[in-house]
Image (cartoon, rainbow, N blue to C red):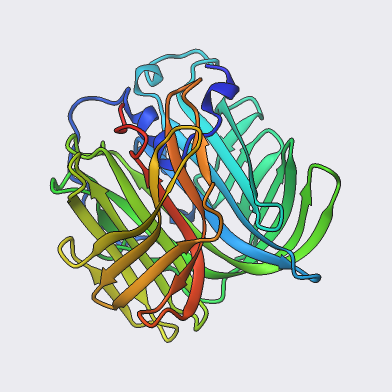
Amino acid sequence: MPARAFSHLSRRSLILAALAAAAPESWALPERTLQFPRDFGSHPDLQTEWWYITGHAKSAAGREFGFQVTFFRSRVDAAQGLRSAFAAKHLVFAHAAVTDLEGRVLLHEQRIARAGFGIASASEADTDVRLRDWSLLRNKDGSYSARVPAGEFSFDLRFTPTQPVLLQGKAGLSRKGPEEAQASYYYSEPQLRTQGKLTLKKGQAFDVDGTAWLDHEWSEALMHPDAVGWDWIGMNLDDGSALTAFRLRRRDGSALWSGGSFRTRDGALRSFGSDEVRFDGAKAWTSPRTQAKYPTQWRVETPSGIFEVRALLDDQELDSRGSTGGVYWEGVSDLLDAQGRRIGRGYLEMTGYAAPLRL
């Protein structure tokens, strides 16, 4: 399939589309102790995997941006027994985007290629994922470098950890549905100090500083058949804390499964059970293109507090109906406390609002 057919898909839409070719049976992932640096790298024995960085940054003059870059690896089961070097045994996807808050616009681009031939790769030893001239790698000092030259924008950013790895779920095994098979190995690195250069298509170059969040997840399971979409947030709080919350939705809007975590700056971690997280839409924005109504303002209840999430730009919808059919919303957003005070910033993702997600 040509690369243009994967433009405008979300990281999870890409993953789930790739999973459509998987074997119909899946199994529960065993509990295991994640080992680093090995588990920073790729896990080709499992079906799907992604490394995902989102963040916000500001220039010296005060111009603000949101940004994201994601690399995906997907195993193609039908090709595993083929001997040809040209067999597409693994696919590598890449997705990058910049939200220009002053310009009130979202810029984005995606790519896809089979692994091999020096075109695309995902190292098993450590984070080192490449797709043509795009790359995300973990350096010897533990920092990450992301280089993304794209058509309408480019960035060359360095992300330095300021806190230990955050193991999501039960010591890194995160449930994603009511069945045990619906789970993934999952860790995050929140509160990444961000520095580098961001350039817009008109040649406007900015030296930027900010904060980012990294997710790395790998799994074998499909999304539960009753789920039509999800809502997800990853938020860096100004005091150094980190909040993750998500829910998978049924067709009637009720929660099929929920989860997340909250870690304080001093390292105290609370993982949330499926009945401990609640999302309530407080304000909806209607897309002029698709007529989909997205709650761009949320009230999120967790055991660690009640929060409000507000999108910094309503129109962060991505539409790919002319190619693979997926329509979703993903963008930079603020986090407020119960009294309405801004306490952090991060990313919000919503799928299944224009139409139920189909595989």
Residue 127, image x and y in percent?
55, 51
Q: Is residue 96 visible?
A: yes
Residue 274, image x and y in percent?
18, 60
x 47%, y 74%: residue:
164
- Lateral position of residue 80 relative to residue 32, left or right: right
x 35%, y 60%: residue:
34
Relative to 147, residue 302 above or below: below
Residue 239, image x and y in percent?
50, 84
Q: Please tell me which residue lies in front, 263 or 160.
A: 263
Relative to 243, residue 73 above or below: above
Q: Please tell me which residue lies in front, 139 or 168.
A: 168
Quarter of the image for the C terminus: give it: top left
Relative to 158, residue 3 above or below: above
x 19%, y 43%: residue:
250
x 70%, y 58%: residue:
102
Q: Please tell me which residue lies in front, 236 or 25.
A: 236
Residue 174, quarter of the rendered image: bottom left
